[in-house]
Amino acid sequence: MGKRVTQPLSISPSDQPALRLKPSKMAAAPRLQASAREYYGNSPTSAGYTIDAEGVSWVQGVGGFFNVPTADNAIQVATEIAVATSNGSGQISLGVTKNADRHYAVLIFAGGATWTLFSVSANDQMDAEIYLDGNTNKWLIFIEDLTTRQSYGNEFAYTTFTTLAGWETAISRGGPVPPMNLITFTNARWVSNWDGWQPITSSAAAAYAQWTLTAPNGGIISPTEIPDPPGTSFTLIPCPSCSS
């Protein structure tokens, strides 16, 4: 039987940058995938996938399973899911972060606070969900370490004008990319206000983008292509010795 955490280990001002869900410029030309547009681009901070549903849907949830990175140096590494407003001023991120040699499950409100929830270990399997409760109009936050069965769940009042979602691994301060394991996301889905749970490639969004991390201080993390269908799984492949 698992342990449900009711109080965070700490709450502190957020010093971790928000996941980059909507860069100002795409690095590659898009192509049409169903009625959603598919983009490829590079980022100096993060690798993974994002969806932009502005003008098509409100994003009312995001979820996914992923493993905790094994990075073992002082570079901060965060693997998270997130929802955000179109301009990024409001964002909720949920996942795991590594500071020095310790890993923690964390909840981050952009421009607000970082909630350090509980300790996790490298290679643990995580289940994370952010979901708008239609009855309370609050965000239900749930994250569980499927290896240890430790979990945290709570509801929060926060802006609901969200049109972006993401599944990413971020490296702080521009790298370098540390030696680490492959990070695989499965069941990576988001919630459309009119069409329920959707895969990343869904046409309930206006576009989705694949981001390759090219760290200024060295190293690359490349995401694999998403099988379509079902459009819910991908792997992030680190290459610390690679350069852009």
Image (cartoon, rainbow, N blue to C red):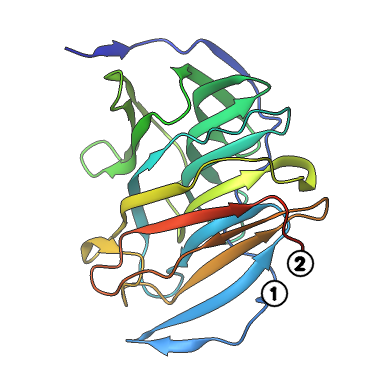
Instruction: Determine which residue is flagged by label 1.
Output: 25
Q: Nearer the viewer, residue 152 or 239?
A: 239
Residue 90 in the image: above or below residue 29: above
Q: Is residue 210 left or right of residue 206?
A: right
The residue depicted at 26 percent of the width and 63 percent of the height is 198
Q: Position of residue 90 (x, y in %)?
A: 56, 47
Instruction: Determine which residue is flagged by label 2.
Output: 244
Amino acid of disc 2: Ser
Amino acid of disc 1: Lys
Q: Is residue 241 left or right of residue 8?
A: right
Element type where label 1 sits in the image: loop
Residue 222 in the image: above or below residue 148: below
Q: Position of residue 234 (x, y in %)?
A: 39, 59
Q: Nearer the viewer, residue 31 or 205?
A: 31
Q: Residues within 10 Å of mark 1 (few under 14, many from 20)?
A: few
The residue depicted at 60 percent of the width and 28 percent of the height is 98
Element type where label 2 sits in the image: loop
